[in-house]
Image: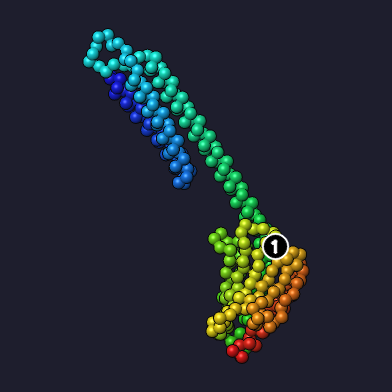
Amino acid sequence: MNWAVWIGLFFGGLSAFFLYYGTHLANQRGNQETSQTVTTEVDKVLKRVDAVERSIATQPPSNLAGDSSQTPLPNSAARREAQQKLADIQQDFSQWASDYIKHRDLKKLELDREKLAARTEELKISNDYRPLFQCAVDAVRGIIQAYNKQAGTDFRIQLNDVPMNLYLPDSFVCEIGTVDFAGTVKWRAYISATKPANPTQPPLFQIDIQYPHFNTNDAFRIEIQPPNFKLVAFGGGVATAARLDTVQPLDSFQVPVRAAIQKLVETQISSLATQ
């Protein structure tokens, strides 16, 4: 076969091999940064291949026993040197690909470990304080349902249970729901949990008391202050009037939480007649 044709096919095949290998690596990792890294490395390899091809083209030809009908072959020393360079290029690329995949796998493993540690901390903190927050939700739901049944009112309760993990993936606020006091006042209950989860910054439970016809809000909050929790009311309205502020131990939260919610509901309902 004519040497020029043969070497063109050889370099074309080698280039295709590098392109396929690089694309395969990029597809395995599946993100833009990885694809760009692999593409850059493949470009470097192809430049080295091109340099070998050009170096062969500049070598003096060998004799063809007087046959001038074929393109002269590079001399044997040039061929051996080119073959060695190509072998080095292939070896270098294979080693780079192996190291790159290994590094990427280790980096991914470390990231997975960090995510697992963060989620473990989230679940641990959630497990510690979810019962307290669920107690508050159950108290609101149960007390208002009992009042509706006894008084014939229709205060609408739309409250979800507290999730097992208080730390949502895409928000610092976990909405629990609302209580609508006949359109006059609305309570909005939610949990605020700052990420990353940190025992020194535990989540808090809050009820915003919203007055549609007034530009003011009132609030009742449960703050965690180990080994205690704190009930806080602020805003100058119903929550403040209920005089709920207190500090209690975390290991006996049921009675004080329910008593505070009971007083808050009673104060809210009593205030409706004056609005």
Q: Quadrant of the N terminus?
A: top left
**Position in image of residue 11 (x %, y %):** 36, 27
Q: Residue furthest left?
A: 69
In the image, is 168 to the left or to the right of 2? right
> Picture quarter containing residue 274?
bottom right
Q: Nearer the viewer, residue 119 or 238?
A: 238
In the image, is 204 to the left or to the right of 212? right
In the image, is 27 to the left or to the right of 259? left
Residue found at x 35% / y 14%:
75
**Position in image of residue 127 (x %, y %):** 67, 61
Residue found at x 65% / y 67%:
204
> Picture quarter containing residue 203?
bottom right
Residue under label 1, please give it: 128
> Picture quarter containing residue 39?
top left
**Position in image of residue 54 (x %, y %):** 35, 24
Residue found at x 50% / y 33%:
96
Q: Is residue 135 visible?
A: no
Residue type, label 1: Asp
